[in-house]
Amino acid sequence: MKWDPKLFIWAVGIVFVAGGGWWSLQSVSTDVTKIQDTLDGQGEQLIIHVAADGHEGSIDRMKNIETTHVQMSEDIRAMMVNQSAICQATGARCR
């Protein structure tokens, strides 16, 4: 049986591609494991950090911001209603 050089080149190429793919898959798997471990550690640190006493002031501040936001949206809604009433009363084409 005679070996065809083209067949040999194809076979070597396929072996290298398969080996490279396997190596790449293993490398990505290792990287994902490292990233997952890092994220798990950061999640635990975040839980501890948020549970610390220093965040009570920022929680109160956020509640004040939310209250102010609700008041502002109600004021804007009232202004829009007033503007539409004025437009209807004067017969103006407001957009």
Image: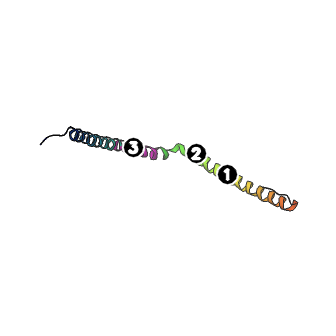
**Neighbours of disc 2 within 10 Å: few (<14), some (14-19), many (20+):** few
Give the CA distance from mark 1 to mark 2.
Answer: 16 Å
Residue nearest the observer in this picture, 53 or 89: 89
Residue nearest the observer in this picture, 61 or 68: 68
Please name the residue shown 23% across and 38% down the image. 9
Disc nearer the start of the sequence (3/2): 3
Which of the numbered marks, if any, corresponds to residue 41?
3
Q: Quadrant of the N terminus?
A: top left
- Residue 85: image location, x then y, percent: 82, 61
Residue lying farthest to the left in this orientation: 1
Q: Is residue 69 left or right of residue 24?
A: right
Q: Quadrant of residue 28?
A: top left
Give the CA distance from mark 3 to mark 2.
Answer: 24 Å
Q: Select label 3 or label 2 by which is in front.
A: 3
Please name the residue shown 53% across and 42% down the image. 54
Q: Is residue 12 left or right of residue 88?
A: left
Which of the numbered marks, if any, corresponds to residue 13?
none
Residue behind mark 1? 69
Which SS class for mark 1? helix
Disc nearer the start of the sequence (1/2): 2
Tell me which segment is drawn in magenta.
Answer: 32-48
Which of the numbered marks, if any, corresponds to residue 58?
2
Q: Is residue 54 left or right of residue 23?
A: right
Disc nearer the start of the sequence (3/1): 3
Q: Quadrant of the C terminus?
A: bottom right
Which SS does the magenta portion mostly show?
helix
